[in-house]
Image (cartoon, rainbow, N blue to C red):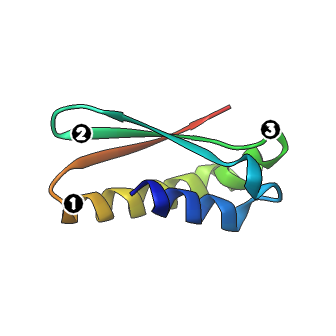
C-alpha cells in the first residue's frame, strides 16, 4: 500500500525525491501520512481536493482487497 501511494504521489509532483509516506498501524486500520514538498502540495491536493479524493478512493479500494481499512492523510 505504501508503494502505491508513493508511486501516485511521485507521478504528480515536481520534486519526487521529497515524497515520504509514514504508516501508523492499528488493529484493523492503517493510516498513511503523505508528505511532499511545500510547493508540490497544491498538485497533490488538486482543485477543490479532487486529486486527494481520488487518491483516497484508490487507497480505500486497494485496502479492501486485504480486508483492512486504510486512510490517507496529506501533511503540510
Residue at which label 3 appears: 38
Name the quadrant containing residue 32: top left
Q: Quadrant of the N terminus?
A: bottom left
Distance in Å between CA atoms under marks 2 and 1: 11 Å
Residue at which label 2 appears: 29
Say whether marks 3 and 2 touch (CB < 8 Å). no
Residue at which label 1 appears: 64
The residue at the far front in this view is 17
Q: Seen in the image, is 2 located left or right of residue 65? A: right
Q: Secondary structure at mark 3?
A: helix
Does label 1 or label 3 sit earlier along the sequence? 3
Q: Badge 1: how crowded within 10 Å, few (<14), some, or many (20+)?
A: few
Say whether marks 1 and 3 touch (CB < 8 Å). no
Q: Badge 2: how crowded within 10 Å, few (<14), some, or many (20+)?
A: some
Residue at position x 58%, y 64% in the image: 8
Say whether marks 2 and 1 touch (CB < 8 Å). no
Residue 41 got which mark?
none
Q: Position of residue 65 (x, y in %)?
A: 20, 66
Q: Quadrant of the C terminus?
A: top right
Distance in Å between CA atoms under marks 3 and 2: 28 Å
Residue at position x 81%, y 54% in the image: 15
Between residue 16 and residue 51, name the one nearer to us. 16
Amino acid at each position: 500500500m505504501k508503494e502505491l501511494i508513493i508511486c501516485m504521489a511521485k507521478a504528480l509532483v515536481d520534486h519526487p525525491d521529497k515524497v515520504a509516506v509514514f504508516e501508523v498501524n492499528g488493529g484493523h486500520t492503517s493510516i498513511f501520512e503523505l508528505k511532499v514538498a511545500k510547493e508540490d502540495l497544491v498538485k497533490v491536493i488538486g482543485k477543490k481536493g479532487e486529486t486527494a479524493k481520488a487518491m483516497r478512493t484508490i487507497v480505500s479500494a486497494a485496502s479492501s482487497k486485504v480486508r483492512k481499512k486504510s486512510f490517507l492523510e496529506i501533511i503540510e
